[in-house]
Amino acid sequence: MATDSLGLYVHIPYCVRKCNYCDFCSLPKGAGGVPDDYVDRLCREFLEYSGKAQRPLDTVYFGGGTPSLLSPRQMEKIVESIEEAFKISPSAEITFEANPGTLTREKVNAFYKLGFNRVSLGLQSIHENELKKLGRIHNYEDFLSSYKMLREAGFENISVDLMYGIPYQTKESFAETLRAVIALSPQHISAYGLMVEEDTPFYAERDTLPIPTLDEECDMYGIASQMLAESGFEHYEISNYARRGYRSRHNSLYWNLGEYIGVGAAAHSFFDGVRYSNSDNVDEYLSSRGLNNHGDRESSQDLAYEYAMLRLRLKDGFSLSDYEARFGVSFTVGKEQILERLEREGLLTLTEDRIALTERGFYLSNSILVEIL
Ligand code: SF4
């Protein structure tokens, strides 16, 4: 993806109810759906960008929260406002995140007609006890019927989200989840390790949560890498696997330090070299006016740090000469000994012009990045 690509992120901070591990900006709405006030506020924010983005959007991503809670009428209004404020490239990747249990045939068909061409469907696990403990609103059957509906509506690009390291999970139960999902032939799979975050029900239970040990979790990471590689998925980012040609273009934009505009509560932007963020308090966002232009222009040093950190999440790593041309400094000077040792330990590869983490390095990326950045 070219680094002059531009993305749009739209945050929908509502869910049916809150999962036990979730610290994202999302409010439980029960059967209430997304308030029209929020839709109106989003539309006003898009219009603030009219004429500001000088190039078409290459990606549009609706995340949350649960964007699939929007009604067809609300989504149509939002898409019309986006089209009024921005040009969308004819080949744009347009994704919405969906929670099984919130999709209907009518909704899926309507979203497809509105131009969505990619869906990220949250499954996490096929096992009832694991899903229940996570506090998910759906079971595996709900997922299967949502997946089928999406395929029947014409969606050819579906990503499935999984989790490992969750309560009650075993290596075998995780492998069963992977086997079941692989059999459905999605284009993309994300597998994230559970993080027990503060201010969540899991945090309150952290000392007694029946989660796998770190060694078991490490084995699960290895199981996912191996099973997905054997099934034709490229492990292109620490937690992401894709069939050829189906890497997430929107997330790739983040990892490549590309520019994006974030609209909605808690949304972040990196636009015109400045990072902005909107309030993560939904009421505050609703009552705010205009753009949230309280951003910082980052120093070249900060950008260089971020670039290396994000690019090392990718299998491709980065080109050392590109890095030097971009930031005016060498990445390797002063780090020769550390890099040599990590290479000897099989955690990274270093060629004349490229540095990248290995498959084993991916799992230990947090501690490796601390050492080399
Ligand atoms: S569905 Fe996603 S955003 Fe909503 S509560 Fe669960 S984890 Fe959080």
Image (cartoon, grey):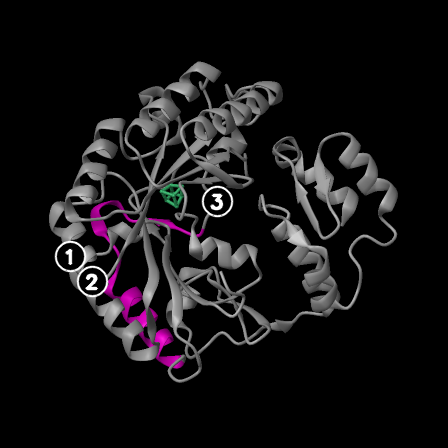
Q: Secondary structure at mark 3?
A: loop
Which residue has dot 2 on it? 114
In the rendering, at what x and y percent does residue 184 appear? 28, 31
Name the residue type under label 3: Asp
Task: Say whether residue 12 is visible.
Answer: no
Q: Residue furthest bottom?
A: 51
Q: Which mark is residue 49?
A: none
Task: Tell me where residue 269 appears, x and y as whole percent.
Answer: 51, 67
Q: Which residue is mark 3?
A: 23
In the figure, 203 relative to 373: above or below?
above
Q: Residue at x 27, y 33 (%)?
A: 138
Looking at the rendered image, the disc whose residue lies closer to the viewer, 1 or 3, is 1
User: On the rendered structure, is 237 left or right of 67?
Assistant: right
Q: Is residue 40 within the magenta segment? A: yes
- Identified at 59% across, 24% down, the residue is 218
Out of 156 and 281, give the one closest to the viewer.
156
Q: Please tell me whether mark 3 or mark 2 is closer to you in this view.
A: 2
- Circles 2 and 1 in contact, beta carbons < 8 Å: yes
Residue at image position (88%, 52%) is 334
Rate crowding at label 3 as few (under 14), some (14 to 19) or many (20 or more) other CA atoms within 10 Å.
Answer: some
Residue 271 lies, in percent from the top left, at 53, 72
Q: CA distance from mark 1 to mark 3?
A: 30 Å
* Magenta span dominant secondary structure: helix
Ligand 1 falls in which quarter? top left
The label on residue 110 is 1
Please state which of residues 356 and 302 is positioned toward the viewer in this rendering: 356
Q: Amino acid at mark 1?
A: Ala
Label 2, label 1: how far apart the Cα atoms are: 6 Å
Res 196 seen here: yes
Q: Are marks 1 and 3 in contact (CB under 8 Å)?
A: no
Part of the protein shown in magenta: 25-48
